[in-house]
Image: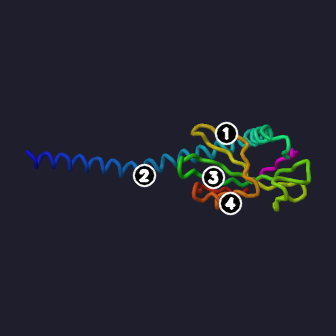
């Protein structure tokens, strides 16, 4: 009776272990398919996302902030995933033109004339790409990934074509 009990537990454990091991490649493949769909969606929505980014970024500027006169987006895209939440983001280098010579945090070394380098952040909420206008100033996407290496892992990088 006791032997049958332990045999039953052993068989159940083996089945659970086999199902668990088999599901790892399936989950990886599912995540890869989701990423490919998200990347395709980013390219389709990119113009709209860039316009939304500028709108959101400029809407939340304080009265002492330099006002943007232009925001130029690079073609390259770096896709990263949050190590803690799994959220997918797209990072795009931007050059921001402002109407004042004194750009960014007083005397920023990366400000040339009235140009400010930075990275635009776009997030994938599981169904759609969104942006809150968040800009990582003074860092291009590769530098931002290095700086936040504990929080972000690279999923893919797309150089300009």
Quarter holding the C terminus? bottom right
Marks 2,4: beta carbons within 8 A: no
Q: Which stretch did the figure color magenta?
A: 66-74
* Few, some or many residues within 10 Å of mark 3 (<14, 14–19, 20+): many
**Distance from the alpha carbon under mark 4 to that under mark 3:** 11 Å
**Distance from the alpha carbon under mark 2 to that under mark 1:** 29 Å
Residue at point 57% right, 50% down?
A: 82
Left or right of 30, for residue 3: left
Residue 78 lies, in percent from the top left, at 66, 54
Which color mode does the image show?
Answer: rainbow
Residue 26 lies, in percent from the top left, at 43, 48
**Considering only order in the chain, which callout, 3 or 4, is on the residue closer to the N terminus?**
3
Disc sitting over residue 142 in the figure: 4
Which SS class for mark 3?
Answer: strand
Residue hosting label 1:
130
Magenta span main SS: strand
């Amino acid at each position: 009776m006791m032997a049958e009990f332990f045999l039953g537990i052993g068989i159940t454990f083996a089945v659970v272990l086999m199902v668990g091991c088999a599901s790892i490649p399936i989950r990886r493949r599912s995540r890869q398919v989701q990423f490919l769909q998200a990347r395709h969606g980013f390219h389709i929505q990119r113009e709209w996302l860039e316009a939304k980014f500028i709108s959101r970024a400029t809407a939340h500027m304080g009265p002492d902030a330099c006002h943007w006169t232009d925001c130029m987006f690079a073609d390259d895209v770096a896709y990263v995933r949050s190590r803690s939440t799994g959220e997918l983001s797209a990072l795009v280098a931007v050059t921001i033109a402002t109407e004042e010579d004194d750009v960014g945090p007083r005397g920023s070394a990366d400000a040339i004339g009235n140009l400010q380098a930075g990275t635009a952040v776009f997030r994938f909420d599981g169904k759609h790409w969104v942006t809150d206008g968040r800009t990582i100033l003074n860092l291009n996407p590769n530098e931002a990934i290095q700086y936040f290496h504990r929080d972000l892992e690279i999923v893919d990088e797309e150089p300009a074509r």
